[in-house]
Image: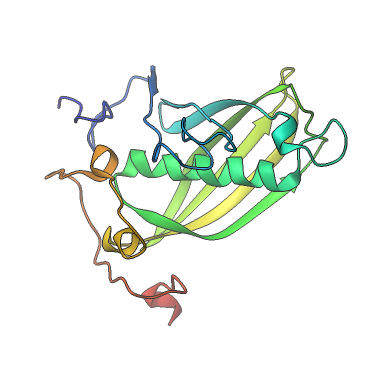
Amino acid sequence: MPPDRTGLPTPGEHHSGLAVALPPHSTHCLGCGPDNAAGLNMQVRREGDTVVCDQVFDRRQVGAPGLAHGGAVAAACDDLFGFVLYLIAEPAVTRTLEVGYRRPVQLGTTYRIRARLVHREGRKLHMSAEGTDPEGTLSFDANAVFVVVDLAHFTRYGPAHFDHVFGPRPDAVRPDVTDGDPEYTCREDR
C-alpha cells in the first residue's frame, strides 16, 4: 500500500523502520508547534513502531538552576504520546500520565525520548516512553493511558484541523466511540 498524504504508512502496512519526520499537531502546540515561542519546539519522527524526539530543554523550561522543570519533562512525554496516535490513525486524549524522574534532566543536553503503544483495551491506549541522556542512561520514563474520542471532541473547543493526521482513511478500523464525556470515561469503566 502507498503511504497516505501524511507520509505515514496506512494501517497494516509494513514499515521498514526508516525514520519518517512527522508534522506538528498544530503550529501553536505547546510541545511541537514551530510558531509557539514559549513551546518545546519538538521535532518528532517515526522509527518503526515508535516515535522519537531528540529534545534539548532550555532556560525557558528551567526548574532548579541548570535543570529542566519536571512539568516540562512531563509535557514533552505527553506531547510525544500524541504522536503515537499518528501511527494508529485515531484521535485520543490523555486520561492519565505518570512520569518517573530517574536522574536530573540538565538544560542544554540532548535527551532522546521514545514512545510507543504497549497495548490496547477497547478505547484505552496504554503507552510507554523513556528519555535517555547522550550516554544512553535512562533519565526519565513515563506511562500513559489515552482514550480514543471522536474528532468532534476537539472542534467543540475551537477550530481544529487534524486532516493531516486523521484524514479519511478507508482502511482504518474505528472502534465504536461515543463522545461528550468530559471525564474521558471508557464504557467499561462506567
- Residue at 82 percent of width and 36 percent of height: 103
- Residue at 70 percent of width and 48 percent of height: 71
Left or right, 132 with reference to 34: right
Quadrant in the rendering for residue 60: top right
**The N terminus sits in image quarter:** top left
**Residue nearer the viewer, 39 or 125:** 39
**The C terminus sits in image quarter:** bottom left
- Residue at 40 percent of width and 76 percent of height: 188
Q: Is residue 70 above or below residue 176?
A: above
Quadrant in the rendering for residue 131: top right
Q: Is residue 59 above or below residue 76?
A: above
**Residue nearer the viewer, 77 or 119:** 77
What sort of colour scheme is used for the picture? rainbow
List x then y, in percent, for residue 8: 28, 29
| Residue at the outermost left position | 170
Left or right, 162 with reference to 25: left
- Residue at 65 percent of width and 55 percent of height: 98
List x then y, in percent, for residue 121: 41, 61
List x then y, in percent, for residue 182: 43, 74
Left or right, 15 with reference to 61: left
